[in-house]
Amino acid sequence: QVQLVESGGGLAQAGGSLRLSCETSGRTDSSYVMGWFRPVPGKERELIATINWSTETTHYLDSVKGRFTISRDNAKNTMYLQMNSLKPEDTAVYYCAARPVYFKDYNFWGQGTQVTVSS
């Protein structure tokens, strides 16, 4: 069973930065894809960034490209989301999630961390 614990949320001003962390435990190998989600109106959640834990291949939602960077530290079993040039519309609860590479759906979730961006 994979456990995920987010941290690093908080309050930032527009144009500022925050770094979210997602500490993982319980994985038996590196064959996982991990991602960051946030809820949006009309949808359950949107996937904003993903990283393949073993290859470090990343993908981003267009609206965060060039502003957000996803990364992972294998030694610390931790995934990160560096968020720069924050906008008020980035305000949300951010969730990290994981799935085995051969699964379509994310089946492990963290509890979420609140990010609030003031204008």
Image (cartoon, helix red, strand yellow):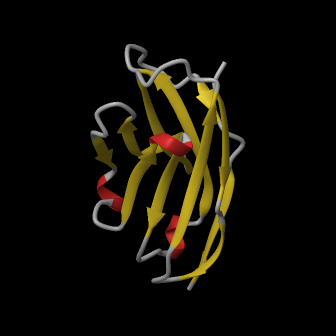
Q: Identify the residue at horizontal 58%, vertical 66% (top origin).
A: 91
Most extreme residue toward the top, as rendered? 102
Estimate the x, y position of residue 79 in percent, counting from the top left. Answer: 50, 46
Q: Is residue 13 above or below residue 86?
A: below
Q: Is residue 42 above or below residue 27?
A: below
- So how many labels did they put on this image? 0
Estimate the x, y position of residue 73 in percent, counting from the top left. Answer: 46, 47
Left or right for 20, reference 62: right
Can residue 43 be seen by looking at this rendering?
no
Q: Identify the residue at horizontal 72%, vertical 42% (top origin).
A: 111
Locate the C terminus and report the quarter of the image it occupies: bottom right
Q: Identify the residue at horizontal 61%, vertical 27% (top origin).
A: 108
* Image quadrant where residue 54 sits: top left
Locate the N terminus and report the quarter of the image it occupies: top right
Estimate the x, y position of residue 87 in percent, counting from the top left. Answer: 47, 75
Of 17 and 86, nearer the camera is 17
* Image quadrant where residue 55 sits: top left
Q: Is residue 118 above or below residue 49?
A: below
Can residue 31 be seen by looking at this rendering?
yes
Left or right for 87, reference 116: left
Of 41 and 17, nearer the camera is 17
Q: Identify the residue at horizontal 37%, vertical 40% (top origin).
A: 51
Most extreme residue toward the right, as rendered? 111
Most extreme residue toward the front, as rendered? 75
Estimate the x, y position of residue 118 in percent, counting from the top left. Answer: 60, 81
